[in-house]
């Protein structure tokens, strides 16, 4: 059966693209999407970052294991918690609502938020990430220089006092 026959989806709404081997081509294909529905058992990881960078909202439902919670972490860092569902019913309802003509205004508002938040939230702030990981490396180096054994390090517990030898 066709998608229209089986699900009521107009064929012109489905676009199948060839495999994109160049990053810029791949990103152009992604930007054509209106909405991405995250897979439930094993979320998109790098692909979800690419989707969000392209400005496309993702609906996700985190489950119990780490691989199913990645996209929720990305959306939290992007300050878009409204795209994180708590139940399968909520996931389905949101997907249907945002995919319907009645949900187009809400979808466009979400897309605008994703685009605007790319440059103002921690998810894509590479400079801050670099500073943070450098602080962790300095802490590890100081521990080693002081003859201390390896240990668990919580980034959130680090401050200037913890980084001193």
Image (cartoon, grey):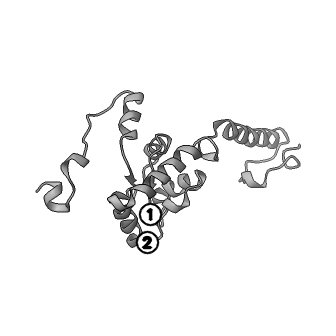
Q: Is residue 130 above or below residue 109?
A: above
Q: Residue at x 84, y 45 (%)?
A: 163
Image: 26 above or below 13: above
Q: Quadrant of residue 146?
A: top right
Whether residue 94 appears in this view of the structure is: yes
Residue 29: x %, y % from top left: 35, 36
Q: Position of residue 47 (x, y in %)?
A: 43, 43
In this picture, residue 30 sits left or right of residue 142: left
Does dot 2 land on a helix, a strand or a loop? Answer: loop
Pointer 2 with pointer 1, Cβ within 8 A? yes
Quarter holding residue 75: bottom right
Residue wearing tag 2? 87
Q: Residue at x 10, y 57 (%)?
A: 1
Instruction: Using the image, tell me which numbered label, if any, was put on residue 52.
Output: none
Dot 1 falls on a residue whose secondary structure is loop
Question: Which residue position is annotated with label 1?
Answer: 61
Q: CA distance from mark 2 to mark 1?
A: 7 Å
């Amino acid at each position: 059966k066709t998608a229209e026959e089986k699900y009521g989806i107009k064929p012109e709404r489905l676009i199948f693209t060839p495999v994109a081997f160049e990053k810029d081509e791949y990103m152009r294909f992604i930007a054509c999407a209106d909405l991405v529905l995250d897979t439930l058992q094993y979320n998109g990881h790098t692909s979800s970052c690419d989707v969000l960078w392209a400005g496309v909202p993702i609906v996700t439902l985190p489950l119990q294991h780490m691989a199913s919670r990645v996209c929720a972490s990305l959306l939290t860092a992007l300050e878009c918690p409204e795209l994180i569902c708590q139940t399968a019913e909520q996931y389905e309802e949101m997907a249907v609502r945002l995919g319907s003509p009645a949900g187009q205004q809400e979808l466009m508002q979400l897309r605008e938020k994703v685009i605007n938040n790319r440059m103002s939230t921690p998810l894509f702030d590479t400079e801050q990430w670099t500073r943070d990981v450098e602080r962790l490396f300095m802490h590890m180096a100081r521990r080693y220089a002081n003859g201390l054994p390896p240990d668990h390090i919580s980034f959130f517990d680090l401050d200037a006092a913890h980084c001193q030898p």
